[in-house]
Image (cartoon, helix red, strand yellow):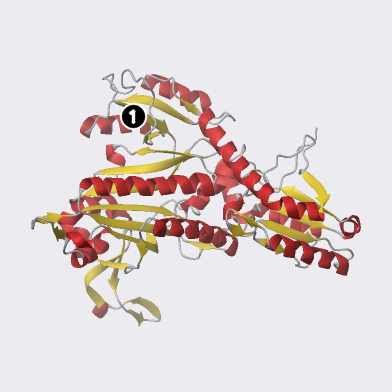
């Protein structure tokens, strides 16, 4: 049997990492920039981010948050105020030391006379500078809760960059809130984790497991950190969003206090939470296939792409008119509360080139219209979520133009739900919960290594060790390139003994390989 031909040069089963990079390039999402470790996000990729951003922003505002903006540069002494915070980010910080360049022998270099009195850190996150603002804004219990969000870029010096997953500069949002007491702050922490979970599953069609991170995986300076973890098609975990309860740690470091109702002076309880353009990497690795990207309709910049087929290098007038009428009808339809996003690709290129371009980009519905279709009053369309036919061809379908207009919204809903169902099934099928010892954990992943089946994760009994005992467990896992992912909120009915220490388990923890 002849080998199937796909739109990508690399298949998932051959090299997942190269396949990922091939999709980023072929789908025209982003490219490497001249600045080491940074990326240029192209219109199709940025359009996806804009839709994710818009959905999140709406939810933030519905839960009482307001947007504001803080400086890119943070005085070094602000960072120094929080010792734990410094320790967590120190190796990743970019520092500005001069404010002017000088030409010396034709070469630009920092002017020694322009050295800053105090270095400025390019923000890796904004807890410290936002904490300073909070200390000025909050005086009374009447000022609480204070709920703000910032859409921004951050810089963390990444040594092994990969587009969307790990870059020196990336885009994100960071929420920061201050509360009068622990209960209110913890409720906020969990509320925002729930927002992330809902967006990941309902909008990105990506099944996630939510829970608490282990002690050594907490955000630097946090009392507790919670995350959503998504399983990629290669079985690795992607931490897709985090929410942190910071207690009064940052409030004490930054002097964030308020006069309580009884007249006392109290420290605020604070939270922070964020997601980034890493979500796009998660969408690629969750849903892509060997022909390219497959976008959930809710984040597709164009949900339906109409391709007028040319003959002898020209588009027949009746074909162009048919496409215009079809687009006009579709533009009046809605799905998920928004008008359908439709586009007619009229560029001067062959039908095959345009077809494969949109297949690689992952447009949910691709419609072709040629002279024969117009004569018959029909359209030919491809659901990008459809598997190839038994003979290896793309699964094109045909129906009347009016019929397609009527059922387009329903098709997009089916595609959204179907893509999520596959992600959910993959996650459910690849979490092994019958493992009770570390030897079994090692054996499980060793048996999966180099095989085509998904390695997945293991859910093992856990006694919640701390300090040196926890470090010993983590060091043991690192030998097999494994890590502790999250202790899920949904726990098994019985636990037994900890798989690592033999002590009585108090919960179960997910173990796997991760990005």
| Horizontal arrangement in the rendering, residue 345 relative to residue 484 (left or right) | right
Q: Does 83 sit above or below residue 508? A: below
State the residue in front, 400 or 127.
Answer: 400
Residue at 35%, 52% in the rendered image: 273
Q: Does 117 sit above or below residue 448? A: below
Q: Does 488 sit above or below residue 310? A: above
Could one spot residue 156 in this view of the protein? no
Q: Residue furthest front?
A: 261
**What residue did someone put label 1 on?**
476
Where on the picture, by quarter, is residue 440?
top left
Element carrying mark 1: helix
Where on the picture, by quarter, is residue 475?
top left
State the residue in front, 399 or 293.
Answer: 399
- Expressed as whole percent of the image width and height from the top left, the position of residue 511 reads 40, 31
State the residue in front, 327 or 302.
Answer: 327
Mark 1 nearby-residue class (10 Å; few <14, some 14–19, many ≥20): some
- Expressed as whole percent of the image width and height from the top left, the position of residue 293 reads 62, 49
Could one spot residue 461 in this view of the protein? yes
Quarter containing the N terminus: top right
Say how many tags the image has.
1
Residue at 51%, 50% in the rendered image: 281
Residue at 8%, 58% in the rendered image: 263
Residue at 90%, 57% in the rendered image: 372
| Horizontal arrangement in the rendering, residue 478 relative to residue 389 (left or right) | left
Quarter containing the C terminus: top left
- Expressed as whole percent of the image width and height from the top left, the position of residue 381 reads 77, 51
- Expressed as whole percent of the image width and height from the top left, the position of residue 342 reads 68, 61
């Amino acid at each position: 049997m002849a080998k199937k031909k796909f739109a990508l040069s690399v298949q998932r089963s051959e090299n997942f990492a190269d396949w990922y990079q091939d999709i980023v390039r072929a789908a025209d999402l982003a490219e490497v920039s001249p600045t080491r470790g940074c990326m240029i996000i192209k219109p199709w990729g940025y359009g996806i981010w804009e839709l994710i951003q818009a959905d999140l922003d709406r939810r933030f505002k519905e839960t009482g948050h307001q947007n504001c903006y803080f400086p890119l540069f943070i005085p070094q002494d602000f960072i120094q105020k929080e010792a734990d915070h410094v320790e967590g980010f120190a190796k990743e910080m970019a520092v500005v030391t001069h404010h002017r360049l000088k030409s010396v022998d034709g070469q630009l270099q920092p002017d020694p006379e322009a050295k800053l009195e105090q270095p400025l850190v390019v923000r890796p996150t904004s807890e410290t500078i936002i904490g300073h603002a909070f200390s000025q804004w909050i005086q009374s219990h009447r000022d609480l809760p204070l709920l703000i969000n910032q859409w921004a870029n951050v810089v963390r010096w990444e040594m092994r960059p990969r587009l969307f997953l790990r870059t020196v500069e990336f885009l994100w949002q960071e929420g920061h809130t201050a509360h009068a007491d622990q209960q209110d702050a913890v409720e906020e922490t969990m509320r925002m984790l729930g927002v992330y979970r809902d967006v990941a599953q309902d909008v990105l069609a990506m099944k996630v497991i939510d829970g608490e991170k282990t002690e050594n995986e907490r955000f630097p300076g946090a009392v507790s950190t919670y995350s959503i973890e998504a399983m990629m098609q290669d079985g690795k975990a992607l931490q897709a969003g985090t929410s942190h309860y910071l207690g009064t740690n940052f409030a004490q470091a930054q002097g964030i206090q308020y006069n309580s109702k009884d007249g006392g002076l109290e420290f605020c309880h604070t939270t922070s939470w964020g997601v980034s353009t890493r979500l796009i990497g998660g969408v690629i690795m969750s849903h892509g296939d060997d022909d390219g990207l497959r976008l959930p309709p809710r984040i597709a910049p164009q949900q339906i792409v109409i391709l007028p087929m040319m003959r002898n290098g020209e588009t027949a007038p009746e074909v162009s008119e048919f496409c215009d009428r079809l687009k006009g009808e579709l533009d009046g339809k809605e799905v998920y509360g928004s008008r359908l996003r439709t586009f007619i690709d009229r560029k001067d290129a062959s039908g095959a080139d345009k077809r494969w371009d949109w297949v690689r980009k992952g447009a949910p519905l691709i419609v072709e219209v040629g002279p024969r279709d117009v004569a018959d009053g029909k359209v030919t369309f491809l659901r990008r979520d459809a598997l190839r036919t038994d003979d290896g061809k793309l699964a094109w379908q045909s129906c009347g133009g009016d019929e397609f207009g009527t059922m387009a919204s329903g098709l997009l809903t089916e595609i959204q739900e179907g893509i999520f169902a596959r992600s959910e099934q993959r996650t459910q099928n690849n979490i092994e919960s019958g493992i009770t010892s570390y030897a079994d954990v090692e054996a499980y992943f060793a048996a999966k290594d180099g095989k085509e089946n998904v390695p997945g994760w293991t859910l093992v009994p856990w006694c919640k060790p701390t300090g040196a005992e926890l470090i010993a467990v983590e060091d043991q896992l690192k030998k097999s390139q494994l890590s502790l992912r999250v202790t899920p909120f949904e726990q098994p009915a019985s636990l037994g003994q900890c798989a690592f220490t033999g002590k009585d388990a108090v919960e179960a923890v997910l173990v796997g390989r991760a990005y």
